[in-house]
Image: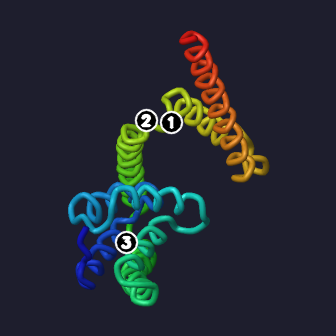
Amino acid sequence: MSKPSFWQAFLFVLKITFISFGGGNALMPIIEKEAIIKNNWASKKEFEKVIIVTNMIPGASVIQAISFLCIKWFGPLKGSILTLISVLPHLFFALLLFVFSRYIPKKYLYIFALAIICVVIAILINFTISFLKTSHKTLKLPLWIFLFIFSSLFSLFVPAPINVSILNISIVISGTLLYQLIVYLKQKKALNKNKGGKK
């Protein structure tokens, strides 16, 4: 793995923040492509840990991922300063868009928003498929299908006061632990059966 120069990292963060219209996980494939696949600035395993951690703690996951990488490359002080400096142009650009949006006809804003939503959905689907391919050894397909269906139904049909994140997370964790327990018991039973057959 190589370490980027300050200006390479600055341009990397600037690029990510300027295209961060999807926010969150929609940008993780782009960060992965630039920092891990194309430039080899971090390992795939580190990046997977970044994804897990940024989804567990509150806040903008893209900024958290960028901060992690910058701090890893340049240390806490320089990494934090680099992240802050790189994010500022994006904030100024967003402010300009906000000011000039009064002069743009609303129909163009709707078309722009719809195009962004379509791109974000496509990026997330692609990211999910690639993540499923790499993690199929640890979590089996039935569990993934269950989690997907449960999350979708929960998000669509459970009213707002009840669908707090802690409830959702605790149910998913309980289901995962139950599934792992069932798999463990089946494996233990098969192992005992094999030992009994050998005698």
Q: Position of residue 151 (x, y in %)?
A: 61, 39
Q: Residue at x 57, y 68 (%)?
A: 59
Left or right of 36? Residue 67 is right
Instruction: Tell me the quarter of the picture where residue 104 sits.
Output: bottom left
User: Label 2: few (<14), some or many (≥20) within 10 Å?
Assistant: few
Q: Is there CB contact under 8 Å for labels 2 and 1?
A: yes
Question: Which residue lies most toward the left here?
Answer: 38
Give the residue displayed 69% in from the left and 33% down from the top.
Answer: 178
Amino acid type, mark 1: Leu
Badge 3 marks a residue whose secondary structure is helix
Task: Report the Cα–Cα distance between label 3 and label 1.
Answer: 32 Å
Residue occupying the point 54% across, 12% down:
198
Looking at the rendering, which quadrant does residue 88 occupy? Answer: bottom left
- In the picture, the quarter occupied by the C terminus is top right
Q: Which residue is mark 2?
A: 136
Q: Nearer the viewer, residue 190 or 168?
A: 190
**Quadrant in the rendering for residue 189:** top right
